[in-house]
């Protein structure tokens, strides 16, 4: 008997036996093998100009910096600050489910949202990964605990990038948005040292 499709607000989800269900397609894609639209971290519409978190470096007019005061302001308007750590002033902001800054919630509605790093970790640690191509499009087939699978397309060969919901700030140089990086070895979490201004794919999840 064929398993019944899970449709939420018009978009199909797959149950991999994890804490969340994963969309079968990226935002802006019509098929699983399409990379879809690419967004900067915290953007809910396609970028049209300069990244909105940039400010000019007063010591070097030719260089832009992330404005942490703006990040803090946006937190009060829709971010969720999730923790401090020791004496490093580490703060992590989480936009998953935010009506203002989560593109998945903005575009798809209902309970769709951008994945957290912990949910990406489930894909990495609890699923099996296989390189494959669909219609000459490279990507990874990720099979869950129950045998169901999703396909994450990549940009070039088996390399691809997917934003998570968290942005990390500390007093050192680890400042940026966390993302899933796909490469020949599979997937792992990394930090966007450009502060989230790089454009990446988004694969929504839903509870």
Image (cartoon, rainbow, N blue to C red):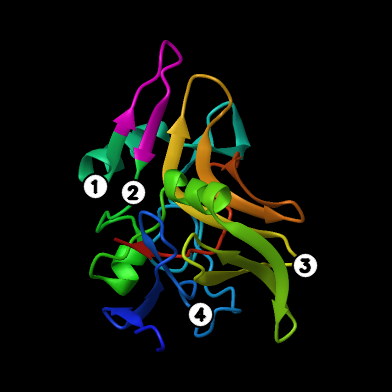
Q: Distance from label 4 to label 1 (Cα)?
A: 27 Å
Q: Is mark 4 on a helix, strand or loop?
A: loop
Which is in the foreground here, disc 1 or disc 3? 3
First of labels 1, 2 by sequence position: 1
- Label 3: which residue? 157
Which is in the foreground here, disc 4 or disc 1? 4
Q: What element carries label 2?
A: loop
Q: What stretch is highlighted in magenta?
A: 82-93
- Contact between marks 1 and 2 (CB within 8 A): the answer is yes
Q: Distance from label 2 to label 3 (Cα)?
A: 30 Å
Q: Position of residue 100 (x, y in %)?
A: 27, 56
Q: Distance from label 3 to label 4 (Cα)?
A: 18 Å
Which is in the foreground here, disc 2 or disc 3? 3
- Label 2: which residue? 95
Q: Residue 78 carries which label?
A: 1
Instruction: Compare residues 197 and 14 and report the one nearer the observer.
Output: 14
Neighbor class of circle 2 (other Cα within 10 Å; few <14, some 14-19, many 20+) is: many
The quadrant of the image that shows the N terminus is bottom left
First of labels 1, 3 by sequence position: 1
Residue 3: quadrant of the picture: bottom left
Q: Farthest residue to the top: give it.
A: 87
Q: In this view, does 35 lie to the left or right of 97?
A: right
Residue 27 included in the magenta stretch of the image: no
First of labels 4, 2 by sequence position: 4
Q: Farthest residue to the front: give it.
A: 1
Determine the residue positioned at 53% across, 29% down: 58
Neighbor class of circle 1 (other Cα within 10 Å; few <14, some 14-19, many 20+) is: some
Instruction: Identify whether 199 is placed above or below 74.
Output: below
Determine the residue positioned at 61% across, 58% down: 128
Q: Distance from label 1 to label 2 (Cα)?
A: 7 Å
Residue 87 included in the magenta stretch of the image: yes
Determine the residue positioned at 67% across, 69% down: 139
């Amino acid at each position: 008997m064929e398993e019944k499709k899970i449709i939420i607000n018009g978009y199909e989800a797959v149950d991999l036996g994890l804490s969340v269900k994963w969309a079968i397609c990226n935002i802006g894609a019509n098929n699983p093998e399409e990379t879809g639209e690419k967004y900067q971290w915290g953007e809910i519409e396609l970028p049209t100009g300069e990244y909105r978190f940039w400010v000019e470096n007063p010591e070097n007019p030719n260089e832009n910096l992330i404005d942490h005061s703006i990040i803090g302001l946006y937190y009060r308007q829709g971010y969720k600050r999730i923790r401090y750590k020791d004496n490093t002033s580490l703060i992590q902001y989480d936009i998953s489910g935010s009506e203002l800054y989560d593109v998945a919630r903005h575009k798809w509605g209902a309970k769709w949202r951008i994945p957290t790093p912990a949910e990406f970790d489930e894909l990495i640690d609890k699923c099996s990964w296989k390189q494959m191509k669909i219609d000459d499009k490279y990507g990874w087939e990720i099979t869950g605990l129950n045998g169901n699978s999703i396909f994450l397309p990549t940009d070039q060969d088996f390399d691809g990038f997917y934003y998570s919901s968290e942005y990390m700030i500390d007093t050192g140089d680890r400042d940026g948005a966390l993302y899933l990086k796909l490469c020949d070895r599979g997937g792992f979490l990394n930090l966007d040292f450009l502060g989230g201004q790089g454009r990446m794919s988004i694969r929504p999840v839903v509870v």
